[in-house]
Amino acid sequence: MSDAIRIFMHSFGMVFRDLGATLRATYVGVVMIVVGVVALLVILPDQFGGLMSQSADMTVTADMNLAGMFVGFFLIAIGYLTMIAAWHRYVLLAADQREGGFTPSAGIVIGYLGRSILLGLLIGILAIPVLIPVGIVGTATGSVLAGSIVAVPLFALLGWVLFRLSLILPACTIGHKMTLKESWQATAPYARTILGIVVLLVLINFGFELVTGALPLTSIIGGLISVVVSVLYALVSASILTTMYGVAVEGREI
């Protein structure tokens, strides 16, 4: 766990040690997120907080600007991908490769999206047999809590598998065509460390949910807080993945 904590603290420090540098590296993606958020604020001011906190009971009506909603969500989604890919590049590119800046090309963003979808589908398939024992326990005991207790370690295992395969994501942002097998092999010496990192992220995410659960997230201010927290969480998560790539593939020291 000590290595996991060291990697987490190092990754956290990279994001927050110099926020100005972080924003300069990722500003294009951040601007896209901001524009998307502003568009949703203008189009759906009353539902915005619930949308951003994923707690809205949305009913699509004829007078809604569906095209505007689509544009807003599209900008936010592409903004996240651009921001994260730019952060990978900022950390991993050598000084002589930085002349073109860190903002990824459209090809890199599309490649990142494709790999993300591939990983999502793979983990989704692996999750099917995981859900079976969770459902059996929940049904047999009649307790949601019992099912949740069984689910936590099983989903932590899925997170561990996902993390071990995910080095293909930072790799594609710097032109390294890594396969899933190569990612799995590269992370093999760090399997325990990655498990510790997954546990830390689960605990942090649980803490976030406790804190945000006490906030009025269905308000506009609450929705904006949700966006800021999710952006920072995404950057820290990307930073951890970038650090693992540097350690496992490039042989860097933490």
Image: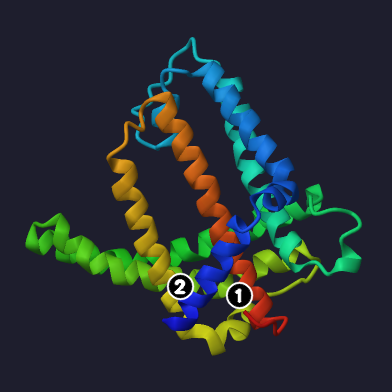
User: Do labels 2 and 1 touch, CB within 8 Å?
Assistant: yes
**Residue at image location 44% in from the left, 82% down from the top:** 2
Q: Name the residue under label 2.
A: 197
Which of the 4 image quarters holds residue 236?
A: bottom right
Q: In this view, does 243 lie above or below 45?
A: below
Give the camera-side residue of 21 and 91: 21
What is the CA distance from the residue labelled 2 to the residue labelled 1? Answer: 10 Å
Q: What element carries label 1?
A: helix
Tell me the amino acid under the disc marked 1.
Met
Which of the 4 image quarters holds residue 200?
A: bottom left
Tag count: 2
Give the camera-side residue of 167 and 117: 167
Q: How crowded is mark 2: few (under 14 residues within 10 Å), some or many (20 or more)?
A: many
Q: Mark 1 points at which residue?
A: 244
Residue 189 in the image: state x and y as whole percent. 55, 89
Q: Is mark 2 on a helix, strand or loop?
A: helix
User: Horizontal placement of 137 versus 116: left or right?
Assistant: left
**Residue at image location 69% in from the left, 43% down from the top:** 29
